[in-house]
Image (cartoon, helix red, strand yellow):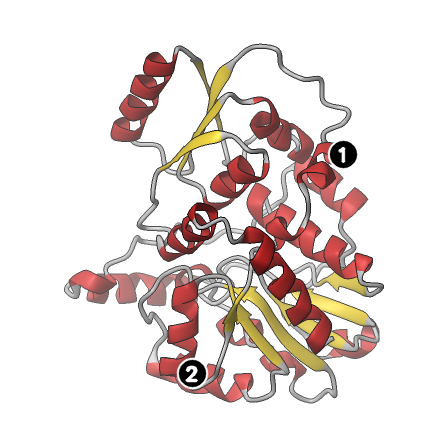
Amino acid sequence: MKIGIVTQPLLNNYGGTLQNYALQTTLKYMGHHPITIDFIPKPSLFMYVLSCLKTIFFFFIPRKRRMFQSIPKRKNSNKEFEVFTSKYITTTRVVDHYLSSLISDYQLDAVIVGSDQVWRPLYNPFLKDSFLMFTQKHNVKRIAYAASFGVDKWEFSLKETIACKECLKMFDGISVREHSGIKLCKEYLDVDAIEVLDPTLLLSKNEYLNLTSNIPVCKEKYLAAYILDRTEEKFIEIQQIAKTIGLTVKEFSASKDATLSVPEWLAMFRDASYVVTDSFHGTVFSIIFEKEFKCIYNKERGTSRFESLLQNYQNNTFATKRELSLRFLKEHL
């Protein structure tokens, strides 16, 4: 079966790139032919101004307060990400809109949306496309795999809620990445969903070790600090932990200027003696590589995804959830 994948743009995001790699790899193991729609949006000044106005309005509602978005500009991929994507991820031509014609151009039999925070309005101004509105004129299977709202509160506008609820009526299967997403789907979108694992957790540790086979093992013992939003408080905590356990600190960046290749980034976790991170996928790969770690919740980026992940980790339910996740894909494809 030829399967199109809709996810966040594959730009300068280690976790986002690897979750897409993992989903494609899993689908290939099942005998399918996946291809990711290579979506790079054009910046929209109107959407930026609208977002700022919403942020100002939400400031007066404590439970809905959020960060201002950056000034929009055309994003370009880091060379290191381009190398990995071209080698390991099958993509369509680059598009700046989700076009209905993509279905026929690539003869798709199914479209999967997921994973990452594809259903969070703050991170996705093209929300309706993540509910596959662009496929409505085609006879294809529609599946949400580990789609994430990122948070446990409802952030959709009334208009978005109505439109997305209508889109979900066409879906053949709906799964979410966080347990809280089940409740949000039922309460606001009137659909039943199940909780599945982030795609990165569908592959074994050895799959990722193979990607790092050309990266020399670092013999130095160190604490890997992978922080998305660096603050003085986090820096002090990292230094205190490192001092307590007698390790030097190596800080790693996730910015657009990051110099690590994707395999080098994985090797950072492979070789670390201890990890401190405020990243969801940083936490995932600490678990995959069986490292001791400290997870710092990143409230602005969403905490419910951390809570579901760590609950599965603490309850040792990954093996069971992996079987359920694979069964979900098999049953709906």
Q: Are marks 1 and 2 in contact (CB under 8 Å)?
A: no
- In 3D space, how far apart are the residues under numbered discs 1 and 2 (Cα atoms)? 41 Å
Q: Amino acid at mark 2?
A: Leu
Q: Which mark is residue 41?
A: none
- Relative image position of residue 101 (x, y in whole percent): 75, 78
Left or right position of 93 against 178: right
The residue that appears at 61% across and 49% down in the rendered structure is 200
In the displayed structure, 303 sits above or below 148; it is: above
Quarter of the picture holding the N terminus: bottom right
Left or right position of 180 against 148: left
Q: Which quarter of the figure has residue 136?
A: bottom right
Q: Which residue is mark 2?
A: 189
The residue that appears at 69% across and 59% down in the rendered structure is 38
Q: Which quarter of the figure has residue 239?
A: top left
In the displayed structure, 110 sits above or below 22; it is: below
Q: Callout 2: few (<14), some (14-19), or many (20+) C-alpha neighbours within 10 Å?
A: some
The residue that appears at 46% across and 52% down in the rendered structure is 312
Q: Which residue is mark 1?
A: 210
